[in-house]
Image (spheres, grey):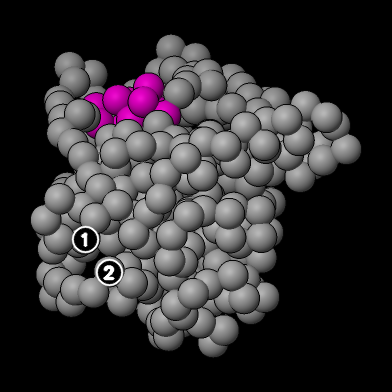
Amino acid sequence: MKVLIVKLSSMGDIIHTLPAVTDAANSILNIEFDWVVEETFSEILRWHPAVFKVIPVNLRMWIRNFYHFSSWKQYYYFISRLTKKEYDIVIDAQGLLKTSLLITRIARGEVHGMDCESVRETMSVFFYHKKHFIEKKQHSIERIRQLFSCSLGYSVPQAMGQYGLRSLFLRKKNNVPYLIFFHSTTKAKKHWPEFYWHFIIKYAISSGYHIKLPFWGRSEELRVRRLVASYTHQTTILSKLTLRDIAVQISGATAIISVDTGLSHLAAVLGCPNLTLYGPTDPKLIGTCGKNQVILHSATKKMENLSPEEVWEVFQKVLNM
């Protein structure tokens, strides 16, 4: 059976789709998945043995630059790649109108998706041949597992979902134990106050740990450099690593503290002990899930109400995992 998955972004959403792929691969003999995904996240999919072909797109860039000829040229090239193959089933796990309109409806195969009561954007269901009711008030991993089971005709396994990635990044011990702090995310309201990170860095260094802080954008770089200014010998700045590179760093870390970011989900995939801090987001619906994962959720939904003392106290449990 040949199946196309349409799930473009974000990193967390893509990672939450992997257990459904594992379920299907374990339930259906010789099933083969192709996956349409934003190019930024395509590397992750190549780590799963059931994903046969990754079809990268730059949908955000195309829409942002729709008036440029080069964007249309790339889009039509993508269409030519997508339509070369006919699929038994196409699963739209994105649930957005723009994705359904520009990608899903063009794919060759019977299209499955969530029904109008379950999907994120109701208009997207007009492009589905088969629509499935999936209860909203549950974790996104379970929602997608149910969507795949309904679309492909098997029962969802009772056991917890497994990400199912190849053993490319084995956990290892380092001579100098280090912690990683994922301090940045795309939305300002999900940031933990920079002042609080200073306390955590001080506590960690006093406990004998080396600290690694990654950055990608300019604002993240400035924040990192302010955070490490007083601790240059006990900290390392990780500059614009690839997903594979950051996965290697995660695999060697003693533990991680992270805000609500896709990289916290990558830590969950790799089984690294991780404390994720949540404010406005409901972690019961889209929080980190997996081995060695601990969640600390602000009762007021405001990140500043999670004090450094409370975070460090809970983090002690994570360090003992």
The kind of secondary structure element at disc 1 is: helix
Q: Is residue 150 magenta?
A: no
* Residue stretch in magenta: 243-252
Mark 1, Cα crowd under 10 Å, few <14 / some 14-19 / many 20+, is: many
Find residue 233 and report its horizontal and vertical position in percent: 43, 12
Indicate the secondary structure of the residue bearing disc 2. helix
Extreme right residue here?
A: 67
Image location of residue 185, percent across then percent down:
58, 45
From the viewer's side, name the closer residue of 284 and 226. 284
Q: Is residue 44 visible?
A: no
Identify residue for label 2.
152
Query: Where residue 203 sits in the image (x, y, percent)?
Result: 39, 38
Image spot of residue 82 (x, y percent): 51, 42
Q: Is residue 108 above or below residue 168?
A: below
The amino acid at mark 1 is Ala
Decide: is 194 above or below 235.
Answer: below
Q: Is residue 317 left or right of residue 284?
A: left
Residue 133 appearing in the image: yes
Q: Amino acid at mark 2?
A: Leu
